[in-house]
Image: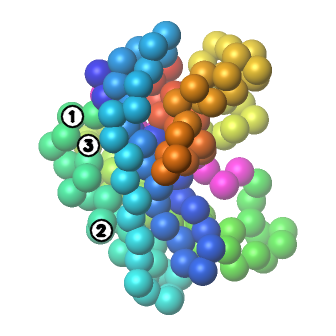
Amino acid sequence: MSVLGVVVVTGTSPRVQAVVLDGSLDAPTVADTFELRTSSTDPAEQAVDLARHIAPKVTGVGYQAVAIRVAGASPVGRRNKAAFSRAHCEGALIYVIRSATGKPVTVVDPVTAPKSVGMKKPQLEELIDGLVSKGVNREAVLAAVVGLAGV
C-alpha cells in the first residue's frame, strides 16, 4: 500500500516536496521522494505551475491515500506574502490531486496529527525520525504517516 505525503516549502519561490511511504503504520518505509519547482515569479502562476507539475505524479499511480501538510494558522493576520503563496499552492494542489485521484486529500495539521494516528507526540516523532534521512522532508513524512493511518 502506497501513500503520498506532500508539503509546500516557501523560500524565494514555493516548491513541493513529497514522500511516498509503503507498508503499514507499524512498519512504514520510504519508497520514493520527489521535489517540484516553479520558475514563475507571480504567486498565482506559481500555484498553477506546481499543480500542473504534480498532476502526472498522481494520475493513475494508485496511491491508497494522499495527504498534505498545511500551513496551519490563517495567513490573513500578518499579511505575509510567503504564507499567502503557500496557501494558494496548497489549495491548487488539493484541487488537482483530488481531481486526478478521485479521492479526498487528507489535510494534516501538526498539532492534531498525533491524535489522528492514535499515538502520543513522542511516539509519532520517533516514528518520523526513523523515516527522515537526507533529502526527505520531515513535514512530508508527517503528512504521509497521517495518510497511512487513515488507510
Locate residue 88, reporting x and y percent: 54, 69
Q: Amino acid at mark 3?
A: Thr
- Give the mark nearer the N terminus: 1 vs 3: 1
Compute the Cα span from label 1 to label 3.
8 Å
Q: Which residue position is annotated with label 3?
A: 101
Left or right placement of residue 125 versus residue 28 in this view: right
User: Which is nearer the eye, 100 or 2?
Assistant: 2
Per the rendered image, the range of residues in magenta is: 64-72
Q: Which residue position is annotated with label 1?
A: 62
Left or right placement of residue 128 versus residue 38 in this view: right
Could you say whether the residue bearing mark 1 is in a helix, strand or loop? loop
Magenta span includes 75:
no
Q: Amino acid at mark 2?
A: Arg
Could you say whether the residue bearing mark 2 is in a helix, strand or loop? helix
- Identify the mark at residue 52; answer none if there is no mark: 2
Q: Is residue 107 above or below residue 27?
A: below
Could you tell me which residue is drawn at 76 percent across and 54 percent down?
Answer: 73
